[in-house]
Image (tube, rainbow, N blue to C red):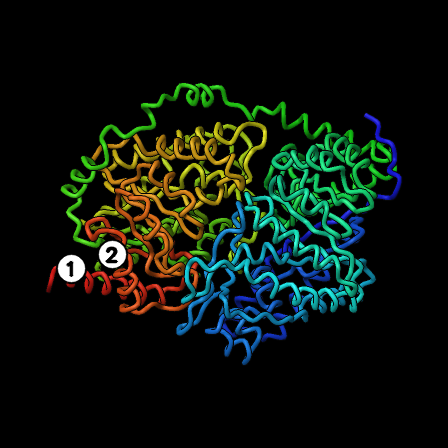
Amino acid sequence: MTTKPAAAAARATVYGYPRQGQSRELKKAIEGHWKGRVTADFLRETAAGLRRSNWRQLAAAGVDEVPTGDFSYYDHVLDTTVMVGAIPERHRAAVEADALGGYFAMARGTQDVAPLEMTKWFDTNYHYLVPELGPDTVFTADSAKQVAELEEAHALGLTARPVLVGPVTYLLLSKPAPGVPADFDPLTLLDRLLPVYAEVLADLRAAGAGWVQLDEPALVQDRTPAELNAAARAYRDLGALTDRPKLLVASYFDRLGEALPVLAKAPVEGLALDFTERAAANLDALAAVGGLPGKRLVAGVVNGRNIWVNDLSASLTTLGTLLGLADRVDVAASCSLLHVPLDAAAERDIDPQILRWLAFARQKTAEVVTLAKGLTRGTGAIAAQLAANKADLASRANSPITRDPAVRARAEAVTDADTRRAQPYPERATAQRAHLGLPLLPTTTIGSFPQTAELRTARADLRAGRIDTGAYEERIRTEIQEVLAFQEKTGLDVLVHGEPERNDMVQYFAEQLTGYLATQHGWVQSYGTRYVRPPILAGDISRPEPMTVRWTTYAQSLTSRPVKGMLTGPVTMLAWSFVRDDQPLGDTARQVALALRDEVNDLESAGTSVIQVDEPALRETLPLRAADHTAYLAWATEAFRLTTAGVRPDTQIHTHMCYAEFGDIVQAIDDLDADVISLEAARSHMQVARELAAHGYPREAGPGVYDIHSPRVPSAEEAADLLRTGLRAIPAERLWVNPDCGLKTRAWPETRTSLENLVTAARTVRAELNGS
């Protein structure tokens, strides 16, 4: 294929970049500041150094326009809340006393003040802080952060484009503040919010911004006519401003659909659209509305969410088609590169042959620059890169790692009977209650306990060869003994072994399954200072040997109380990995489910009576368009049932979900046919309990009463009040008592007190129910 040069030089850009630094310097500085080890000035200097390093790397790679404003100490939506002055009343005093301390209080809470609710950013594993708004909300502009970062980039001699969360998406992501009626619609505040955006835009123009990007990913979801009209009004009003930079409205993660004509007609100077596989319909839709005559189009043709090398020839074909649809076409990744690791070149333990298939943020930046060069000067200018890329794609397609005939044959042989428990839930519940003998309002935890410094040191010492496997395993045994002893003393009813041997709930399993690759430096931000290393799902999946049976069985030998076996479910194994893109997700999920089914059956055979298969990503992975939900939920729920359906009726299957909008998938939760589900509920004030009740959910549930993403310790009375709220929706005989999520990120002192208070709350409410 030969591509003719573009009429105007195509510029290369990205919408955002990983924040943490090569060695997670930002995480270390923030956590050091929280612990009082480093000053606020040191934290600010560290952050500024990381921003400068990112911009210089981008410029050196050939990026023509670097993003500013995307950097955050915790979350870019929280930064937007600060920018528009929507500080919750309970946090105002803290913010006024110390802006940085108040910022972190909104994110994490304090002992006396609850944080903002946290949930998933669309269908990614990134968590954002949910804005709280009400009819009395007063917006005020605070552009200091955005202006300062733009000026920092200009001081380096760079062309920079501030990136802001757009006003429509900000309001659509918001919720009614505590005490505000649940039917309050934050979008009614749009006319109050737009003048604040106008003021911020004017400040950025005064600071030298030529363009400002306003991100509107919420518009790729199904939107009502009223919401589309609000978007049209927002960009009519912002476009009509005279004191503003040029506006680039960006949307990504899926096709825009009915929102595309709205944005195409808006009086703004440019649109940035996703043209990767999941949003390929944007191409025809853009042609159908007559393109963007006289406007700039930024084409997101490099996948910003996955780590496989781009098909450069295919992207050039797309870009060539787009040339006739806009005044100028520039090249970008499909979304912020926040969702991928920093640099594949840092990986030393991955086979060089496989490393050729991978593109992290730096490699994706190079792809964007290469494509811009090819679009500007023709394919002859990038002939060497095209040839190398073709060879890399062929290497992956022809590799034996990607196909295992035995795995494929087993997956193809699955029948509907393999995905159904032999007995209906009422019969199972009777058998389980007789077998387990649990009290009313049984207490448990979600699985993990604090990963102490001693544990992390032991793991590092094992990797470095400073201790042998025997010494490491002795440390694990000691930790399990201590965790079991604490739970028994505290009075928990169903225990866990604490997962001291696990580095991560997905990575731990991926390292023991065929077809997965683990990285050493592939860190990606999940929320705040929580970073994960998503494994890479490169080939067909099988389980060579048991993964959890040994330590679960050891823990059970220490107590007469039931100990839960703990597994990560098939959908979450996909969602929190970089999944292969060369076959349907449902096919991959079935392979993972069969591997996990073997583990479930082995746990049961070893005497484990309660087995939890976590699926926190079930809602997160729900497609953004309702038209795509049915097909996804069919294979997702089937994969869970395939994992769990082979056990006896008296074996109790649990699942767990957290930090998502569960109301959208209550029927799917029902379709999982788990015996017990535990869910995040503390920050959302038991909303999920009400949603389960409205659906008529017939099984047992544990809406969380302890928010583990905050350092604050809930009192026993606070937990009891949440339990009483839960009881108004879920009958006592079906209600469990547990934290929101695992305790891995918490410290032991707060964990001990919080769980003691949780058990006290359960006993208090249990006594109330028994009339004693």
- The mark nearer the N terminus, 1 or 2, is 2
Is residue 465 among what the camera can see? yes
Residue 154: image tag: none
Front one among 244 and 511: 244
Give the residue drawn at x 57%, y 46%: 225
Amino acid type, label 1: Leu
Above or below for 141 versus 486 = below
Left or right? Give the position of 62 relative to 685. Answer: right
The relative height of residue 543 versus residue 467 in the rendered view (above or below) is: above
* Mark 2 secondary-structure assignment: helix
Q: Residues within 10 Å of mark 2 (few under 14, many from 20)?
A: some
Q: Nearer the viewer, residue 495 or 345?
A: 495
The location of residue 83, given as percent across then percent down, is: 62, 67
Kind of residue sitting beneath label 2: Leu
Say if mark 1 contacts mark 2, CB within 8 Å.
yes
327 sits left or right of 423 in the view: right
Question: Camera-side residue: 400 or 325?
Answer: 325
Q: Is residue 405 above or below residue 679?
A: above
Q: Residue 727, labelled with which disc?
A: 2
What residue is rendered at 38% in x and 38% in y? 668
Residue positioned 60% across, 38% down in the render? 350
Q: Residue at x 50, y 79 (%)?
A: 93
Q: How many marks?
A: 2
Residue position marked by numbered label 1 in the rendering: 769
Q: Is 194 situated above or below 391?
A: below
User: How far across and how far down the image is residue 269, in percent?
Assistant: 78, 51
Quadrant (top left/top right/bottom left/bottom right) for the C terminus: bottom left
Q: Quadrant of residue 160?
A: bottom right
Q: Residue furthest left?
A: 772
Q: Is residue 145 left or right of residue 506?
A: right
